[in-house]
Image: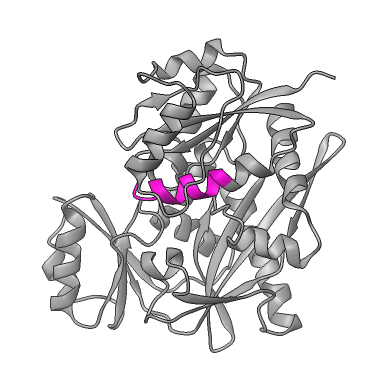
């Protein structure tokens, strides 16, 4: 039986470039080689595509390597001397693209739309669901519309309002949590206890982003829960996993806490009780559905006074061997090779 040729897109132009490299190393080495022939395609921080020219592409171990060190080794081992026109993907007979990207242009619908134009199916959500999930303000509006608790929030848009005036007269109390509306992976996020602190943080974000979400800070236990889809004939069986409780050793589960080894403790399944676990599973399925997600997703919550407040839904969650969805799948006895088979089967049937 001939193998199905797929592309593994990784790297990308977002602030989560190095996380994508780590995730995709796990993906590359876990995908079922009896079914699939995998060609890793590196997108560098400038958006250039580096496509292997060898018959059996190699994915070097990224452990303890900088992005530059990894890219140099990747290009050397795969005999790549120059970047390719991205449209060349359409000429390489890929049946599907496995998206190992995270954040920014990898997760907000742009790469999904590009692949749609090329006629290459891909894993994960489509253009609309990807864009909606990345837009935290619009996602919050949707979550509220179906009765899922969301902490009070508002959005500031660069050049359209007086941030200082608004931050001095918020309709909800300080402290607040501030983040780019379209950001990912907790980059440039932070707490502000006063209007002055809020103005400073908003000004910092406005250097690189045009929209900022300001939300009343909800303190409590942070949990995250994944949703998977399993193809069953022509249908997709959508189900929730078990929640993971995240206990950062810093004040918040920020970028450093999320991706620095030992910076947070993760407990799977989360010790939150049967009733709350069922609520989290129900809410995660509703978030997945209202956004129109496909294949998989992961939704983050803060539990405060017994109420789970939704933070955001990720359409391309981390996929290193120790990431949250692999932890949760393992807790239920689900092999990640099977999960990746499901994602590819779903993409190939669309």
Residue furthest top in the image: 91
Q: Nearer the viewer, residue 2 or 217?
A: 2
Q: Is residue 267 above or below residue 93?
A: below
Part of the protein shown in magenta: 14-25
Q: Quadrant of the C terminus?
A: top right
Residue furthest bottom in the image: 305
x then y, percent, for residue 69: 36, 42
Residue at the image point whose x is 44% and y is 40% from the top: 106
Q: Is residue 114 visible?
A: yes
- Asked if the magenta segment contains residue 347, the reply would be no
Q: Is residue 293 visible?
A: no
Total of numbered circles in the picture?
Answer: 0
Rendering quarter of residue 241? bottom right
Q: Is residue 311 above or below residue 181?
A: below
x then y, percent, for residue 325: 64, 59
Q: Nearer the viewer, residue 102 or 113?
A: 102
Residue at the image point whose x is 19% and y is 82% from the top: 194
Residue at the image point whose x is 42% and y is 28% from the top: 75
Residue at the image point whose x is 36% and y is 44% from the top: 67
Question: Relative to 201, is 293 on the left or the right?
Answer: right
Q: Is residue 141 above or below residue 250?
A: above
Q: Quadrant of the N terminus?
A: top right
- What color scheme is it? one colour
x then y, percent, for residue 264: 48, 76
x then y, percent, for residue 46: 29, 33
Q: Is residue 138 above or below residue 330?
A: above
Q: Nearer the viewer, residue 177 or 105?
A: 105
Majority secondary structure of the magenta segment?
helix
Rendering quarter of residue 224? bottom right
């Amino acid at each position: 039986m001939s193998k199905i040729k797929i592309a593994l897109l990784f790297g990308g132009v977002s602030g989560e470039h190095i996380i994508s490299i780590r995730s995709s190393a796990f993906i590359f080495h876990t995908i079922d080689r009896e079914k699939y022939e995998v060609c890793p395609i590196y997108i560098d921080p400038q958006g250039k595509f580096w496509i292997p020219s060898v018959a059996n592409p190699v994915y070097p171990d990224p452990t303890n390597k900088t992005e530059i060190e990894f890219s140099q080794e990747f290009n050397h081992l795969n005999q790549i001397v120059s970047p390719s026109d991205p449209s060349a993907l359409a000429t390489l007979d890929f049946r599907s693209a496995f998206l190992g990207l995270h954040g920014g242009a990898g997760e907000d619908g742009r790469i999904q739309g590009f692949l749609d134009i090329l006629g290459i199916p891909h894993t994960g959500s489509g253009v609309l669901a990807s864009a909606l999930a990345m837009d935290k303000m619009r996602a919050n509006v949707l979550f509220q519309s179906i009765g899922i608790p969301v902490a009070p929030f508002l959005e500031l848009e660069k050049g359209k309002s007086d941030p200082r005036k608004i931050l001095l007269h918020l309709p909800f109390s300080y402290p607040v949590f501030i983040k780019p509306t379209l950001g990912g992976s907790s980059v440039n996020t932070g707490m502000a206890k006063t209007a002055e602190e809020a103005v400073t943080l908003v000004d910092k974000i406005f250097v690189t982003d045009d929209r900022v979400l300001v939300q009343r800070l909800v303190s409590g236990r942070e949990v995250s829960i994944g949703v998977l889809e399993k193809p069953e004939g022509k249908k997709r069986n959508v189900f929730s996993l078990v929640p993971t409780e995240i206990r950062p050793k810093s004040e918040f589960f920020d970028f450093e806490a999320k991706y620095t080894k030992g910076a947070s403790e993760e407990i799977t399944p989360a010790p939150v009780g049967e009733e709350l676990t069922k609520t989290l599973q129900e809410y995660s399925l509703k978030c997945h559905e209202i956004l129109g997600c496909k294949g998989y997703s992961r939704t983050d919550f803060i539990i405060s006074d017994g109420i789970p407040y939704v933070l955001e839904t990720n359409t391309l969650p981390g996929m290193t061997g120790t990431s949250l969805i692999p932890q949760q799948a393992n807790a239920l006895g689900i092999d990640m090779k099977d999960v990746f088979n499901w994602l590819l089967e779903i993409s190939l049937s669309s």
